[in-house]
Image: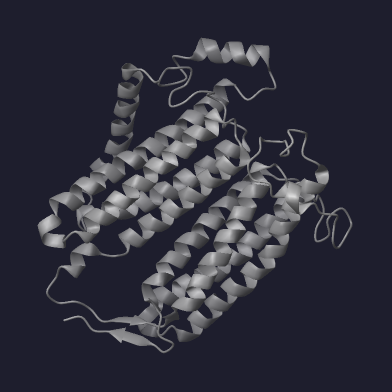
């Protein structure tokens, strides 16, 4: 169990980190503090996802092999002796001073997001009479989600980077990003106004839901590739080891509960299983391209000059798709360079953000729907 002093120090670090954007928002004119905070949370969660990818790709996930601190203290400065000793005993191991700092900065950012969501809950509670219960319940749901995400962050360390735990950790982070984006775009305070604007909803919700489903599956497959270090299992493109359809072992490749680098029997995972993991991600990318490109094309056709924001998101969706293809191929052709891998993860998060933003204009009706609010 972490000691009280460690928890207190980490809480103070989270307060300091969270205080910086709060101070900036307090002084910045424009929208209400509550609305600005909601969008800052979206921005910081996106950054957290990208930095989490950086932590994983630099093999820094075990830079501090305990949790929530680093060798029982709140920062690597105080654990310098233990870190140097671990590095000296195993120079090629997961513990170095740099990796320890990368891992702890990732944890500090996660704690900052959690602290800001607590502020969001407090603000929603303070506005209960003006805004109603929906913002408070929504914020409490986000708080619960970030706590679950924190638990998976702890298990990532304590279970030694077990692939299904690391993959779930990323999926929950993207779910948190989607939830925060949906929450921020609600514009709660405008809903309490007497006069409300007309909203036109031309985006077919059925197609948008299909896009969410296929993108979720593809992101899971991509995370499964990354957490199993299967990116270079097929080192050529568009073939895999020179074959248009490589040898596969689906049961071994997609046995989820197992240790990193091992199969369900505790033996080293076979190259064929890693090829299968990689190949599945490539194949399903075709489905994602078709569905999301169709959504983008239909939305651009439906968008009018009045819906210029929707048109921009439709074009952004198409641009992100192209960039995902480029960075995905670059990961293979250039042997998994760090920049391309980071951009690929950032692109996945950006696609999630883009789809959630487009849901603002979605309707289940087959024809364009106008919603008049009195």
| Quadrant housing the C terminus | bottom left
> Is residue 194 shown left or right of residue 259?
left
In the picture shown, does residue 345 fall above or below 58? Answer: below
Work out whether residue 18 can be spotted: yes
Q: Between residues 31 and 66, which one lies in front from this camera angle?
A: 66
Return the x and y of residue 125 as percentages of the image width and height. Answer: 17, 50
Return the x and y of residue 290 as percentages of the image width and height. Answer: 63, 74
| Quadrant housing the N terminus | top left
Return the x and y of residue 348 as percentages of the image width and height. Answer: 55, 57
Work out whether residue 315 can be spotted: no
> Is residue 16 shown left or right of residue 52?
left
Q: Residue at x 14, y 55 (%)?
A: 127
Return the x and y of residue 25 as percentages of the image width and height. Answer: 25, 48
> Is residue 354 shown left or right of residue 199?
right
Residue farthest to the bottom, as pictured: 367
> Is residue 302 shown left or right of residue 99?
left
Residue farthest to the front, as pictured: 265
Q: Between residues 252 and 222, which one lies in front from this camera angle?
A: 252
Q: Residue at x 72, y 63 (%)?
A: 283
């Amino acid at each position: 169990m972490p000691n009280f002093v460690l928890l207190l120090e980490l809480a103070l670090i989270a307060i300091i980190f969270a205080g910086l954007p709060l101070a900036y928002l307090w002084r910045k004119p424009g929208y209400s503090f509550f609305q600005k905070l909601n969008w800052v949370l979206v921005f910081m969660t996106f950054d957290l996802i990208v930095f989490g990818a950086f932590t994983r790709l630099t093999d820094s996930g075990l830079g501090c092999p305990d949790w929530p601190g680093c060798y029982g203290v709140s920062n690597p400065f105080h654990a310098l002796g233990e870190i140097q000793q671990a590095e000296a005993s195993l120079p090629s191991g997961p513990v170095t001073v740099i990796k320890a700092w990368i891992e702890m900065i990732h944890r500090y950012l996660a704690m900052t997001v959690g602290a800001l969501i607590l502020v969001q809950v407090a603000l929603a509670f303070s506005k209960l009479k003006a805004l109603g219960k929906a913002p408070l319940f929504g914020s409490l749901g986000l708080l619960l989600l970030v706590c679950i995400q924190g638990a998976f962050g702890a298990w990532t360390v304590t279970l030694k980077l077990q692939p299904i735990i690391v993959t779930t950790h990323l999926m929950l982070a993207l779910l948190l990003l989607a939830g925060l984006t949906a929450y921020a775009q609600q514009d709660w305070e405008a809903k309490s106004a007497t006069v409300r604007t007309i909203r036109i909803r031309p985006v077919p919700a059925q197609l948008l839901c299909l896009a969410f489903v296929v993108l979720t599956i593809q992101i899971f497959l991509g995370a499964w590739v990354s957490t199993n270090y299967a990116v270079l299992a097929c080192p050529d493109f568009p073939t895999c080891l020179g074959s248009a359809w490589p040898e596969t072992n689906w049961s071994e490749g997609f046995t989820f509960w197992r240790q990193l680098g091992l199969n369900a029997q505790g033996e080293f995972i076979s190259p064929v299983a890693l090829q299968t993991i990689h190949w599945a991600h490539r194949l399903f990318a075709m489905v994602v391209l078709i569905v999301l490109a169709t959504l983008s094309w239909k939305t651009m056709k439906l968008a009018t000059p009045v819906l210029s924001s929707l048109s921009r998101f439709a074009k952004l969706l198409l641009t992100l798709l192209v960039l995902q293809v480029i960075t995905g191929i670059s990961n293979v052709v250039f042997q998994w360079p760090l920049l391309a891998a980071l951009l690929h993860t950032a692109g996945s998060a950006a696609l999630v953000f883009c789809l959630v933003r487009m849901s603002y204009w979605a309707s289940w009706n087959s024809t364009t729907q106008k919603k008049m609010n009195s």
